[in-house]
Image (tube, grey):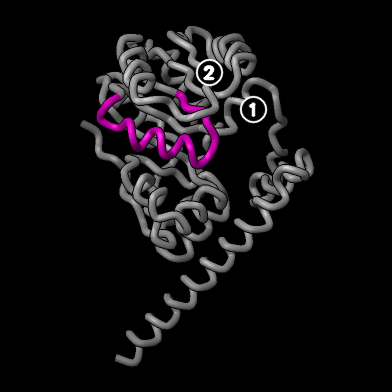
Amino acid sequence: MSTTPRKVDLFGVGVSVTDYEEAASRIIDAAARRESFAMTALATHGLTEAVRDPGLRAAVAGIDLVTPDGQPVRWAMNALHGTGLRERVYGPALMGHVCERAAREGVGLYLFGSTPETCQRLTEELPRRYPGLRIVAVQPDRFREATPAEDAEDVERMNASGAGVVLVGRGCPRQERWVAAHRGKVNASMMAVGAAFDYYAGNIDQPPAWMQQRGLEWLFRLTQDPKRLWRRYLLHNTLFCWYFAQALLRRARGASVTARG
């Protein structure tokens, strides 16, 4: 069994110190063995949601691999813990790495979430981008929580499909709660990838590379859908800055006490 990357505490939430190569390898390794494994990628929105919601924080704590999806998350990890991460591990990009490896190694994918139309586009687009990729089953979202009977049927269907990777595109924080709750039930690597479904299906545009590198992806997405997203970014970007400033202050005070001692 491969070692899962260590986590560092970021405002009370554990985030994995990893890169694309290590993360993709761990996901594919679990998939090849049909090991139940949970992964998500947290940007500032998901991170601050987990800080504020004890239930979500507990769910995230039960996820094996929590990658630093946003540049600000990476910056905070480097500043507070000296992790030396040179790049973030962005959910849609990691999904691409995993699809490439899955195509090469014969690992089947199960698509879970989003609309029937988006799932249909994914079944066409993903094999086009990654020749040889097998999509063994598709299950659009119900856009409500499953009943216990429906949930049991979902688990049985996923396990019977032979999929090594279940891509979960249900949006944050529903997808994080789902992968955490199904760890140990679904015999596959479950990847909570959120907006990656819409990116690959062509429903929304990817921000330019220069905006991604500078942590401005939120601004690009805001310009695409301001009516829906302005409250999210106003609240969660502000909260992230506040939590980060508090953590820096605590770190400085701790260093000062150590120096005096």
Quadrant for the N terminus in the image: top left
Q: Secondary structure at mark 1?
A: helix
Quick check: 226 left or right of 240? Answer: right
Q: Secondary structure at mark 2?
A: loop
- 174 in magenta: yes
Quick check: 61 left or right of 206? Answer: left
The magenta segment is 167-185
User: In the image, residue 133 lies at what x, y percent?
Assistant: 48, 11
Image height of 62 relative to 171, above or below: below
Which mark is drawn over residue 140?
2
Residue situated furthest bottom in the rendering = 260
Figure quadrant of residue 120: top right
Figure quadrant of residue 83: bottom left
Amino acid under disc 2: Pro
Amino acid under disc 1: Tyr
- For the point 56% across and 68% down, the residue is 242
Spatial CA distance of label 1 from label 2 is 16 Å
